[in-house]
Amino acid sequence: MSAPIVVRAATLPTGERADLLLREGVIAEIGTVAAGAGAEEVDADGLVVLPGLVDLHTHLREPGREDAETVRTGSRAAAAGGFTAVLAMANTTPVTDTAEAAERVFDLGRAAGLVDVQPVGAVTRGLAGEELAELGLMARSRAGVRVFSDDGRCVADARVMRRALEYVKPFGGVVSQHAQEPTLAGAQACCHEGELSGRLGLPGWPGVAEEVIVARDVMLARHTGSRVHVAHVSTAGSVEVIRWARGQGIQVTAEVTPHHLLLTTDLLAGYDPVFKVNPPLRPEEDTLALREALRDGTIDAVATDHAPHARHDKEHAFVDAAFGMLGLETALAVVRTAVPELSWEEVARVMSANPARIAGLPGHGRPVAVGEPANLTLVDPEAEVTVDRDASHSLSRNNPWHGRTLRAAVVGTFLRGARTHG
Amino acid sequence: MKHLLSIDDLTVDDIETLFGTAAEMHDVQRRSVKKLPALRGRTVINLFFEDSTRTRSSFEIAGKWLSADTINISAKGSSASKGESLRDTVLTVTAMGVDALVVRHAASGAAEQISNWVDVAVINAGDGMHEHPTQALLDAYTLQRQLGDLAGRHVVIVGDLTHSRVFRSNVKLLRKLGAEVTVVAPPTLMPSGIDAWSKEAGFAASWDLDEVLPSADAVMMLRVQRERMQGGFFPTPREYTVGYGLTRGRLSLLKPDTPICHPGPMNRGLEIAPEAADAASSKVLDQVSSGVAVRMSVLYHLLAGEEVA
């Protein structure tokens, strides 16, 4: 256990200023903390303290593509982004579709010790969309898997999706769906289908390819009485469906990525594969609807979909290049830049409390209060930082924010009272 | 002008200069000795990631008649599937010491991406469904030789617009030259967002070929790719021909001597009837000979040290 830390004169999410004493992994005192022998002092004057951020959607690439990212380097990037827990997606090689595979990722995360790495289990064996993976054994494993996703692929077969939703109920699991009807998104589809894709001659897929799956899945959730989570919502139409489903009392939660809040499809005009991502960047009207949905609570959480790729996997023709972009280190600043009207309490809700609740992580997403785990993030709210892709802790450089100036910066992260960044 | 990636790279002055030189080159083609010394000692690589006979041969002849050393490299199949990145493939070829890359690739945007990685001239010889600028130049050059100034002339482009780089380059170039353009296709072969695009770019889009043909000053028929026939874009080839083919019956809708173009290879009986392909007003073979002249002009202006305009 690390030495006690006094975080001096921090601004709480509520706006009050106070000192925090972090001791034995928990917040021991909040208020005016006397300088104590042996306690490390952190000057947080002018800094906002948030509960440690939780990412529902991270690709750490280990095992399989350790040249693009490892659990350790991804953890370091996460800590630098203010995260204290990340959910590691299952589309590794081999796929996280067994208890053993889940425990391995879990253990690698604990060994790195920078964030709590919580494995996501595959819904179907090998992400093939056909037979259920060993969902129950993953749930019973040391990793305690609760979130299941074939992310990168849609669970397109309605029968398989129905069974998965039913099967995870006894252990409180949730299926996180990558909503993309494959028959509406051809094998070559690489971007949003719209006016620009028509001009550029790029095969795309329309927003409706996402929306028909979201609509189907909320109806399946209603039928089964299960809860479903919609990963990386990217269209206004999906937001409408989710809003309606909420109104019906259907148990549906949803996440949006930072990039879908701010980046738009017109960035594809130069065919730069750094902007190739799945779901694709959409037109501005979609980004506006997503921001509104985040503000009004229709979308519960921001999740990065951090997707590192080796440089050579992006140096292909646009249709051949890999999908995905980095996101862990810039997430908070992008949210701050895209939706500056969110209060810090609301930021804590969408980037910490809600994702922790959806993922079933009891030690995360807690209020900044005495007795709670000392998982905390310090933010300089006034910072303006120009992103430099080479300054990243990730092994990869597919950073769509390179050269952009963003508001606010994470300056410190604490995991159970131990400093992991800053 | 360092590269020719898109019609967007060209001003109207550039186009006129290219056409002027093409006309001179066209005269050279008629001589018994066709070789000019303009590009002696220069090396042009035809880097073809996708099969092509006519475009590659046309560039090859154009380069040879200008005395360039032209070399064909066929790199078929996506480099991704071979484990080499496109950038590595291109840097490897360029490192041999070349002055220009003529690039054909099945992926839209490939030529533009390549131009960002190398410092030699890049000529787009067709990138996926995006552009085929020399095809558009040779089409407009061919039409201009018959019709004169294209400003105000009505050009009708018919066929698989969604998948056509020829259409995309042509609509840009014809609009730059002041032509009125109507594009015709069934809804399933219209590019996404065509309504907004056509409005902004000032051309018309129609589903009704019979309504459009009587006012045409020129007709360009596009090839229907074989793989589209199984793609669910239209029910049967027969139905396509009835709706969108330039059939013998439709020839009577055209004004006399209306030039008929097709970029080839033609599917006779599908998008174009033999009576149309072989009509006195058919420009199909003129397009091919103009193609060499236009490509000579492009190579000359990119490589002979002269700026276009």
Image: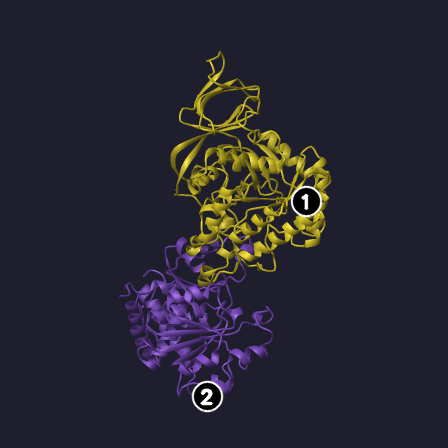
Amino acid residing under circle 2: Ser
Residue position marked by numbered label 1 in the rendering: A226
Q: Secondary structure at mark 1?
A: loop
Q: Secondary structure at mark 2?
A: loop
Residue B72 sits above or below residue A64 on the image: below
Residue position marked by numbered label 2 in the rendering: B252
In-image side of B100 versus A19 (left or right)? left
Query: Quick check: do tags 2 and 1 share a chain?
Result: no
Residue A15 sits above or below residue B216 on the image: above
* Rendering colour (chain A): yellow
Amino acid residing under circle 1: Ser
User: Chain letter of disc 1?
Assistant: A
**Near-viewer residue (B102 or A55):** A55
**Place of residue A354 in the rendered image (x, y in percent of width and height, measured from the top left):** 56, 37
**Place of residue B296 in the rendered image (x, y in percent of width and height, measured from the top left):** 35, 71
**Place of residue B118 in the rendered image (x, y in percent of width and height, measured from the top left):** 39, 54
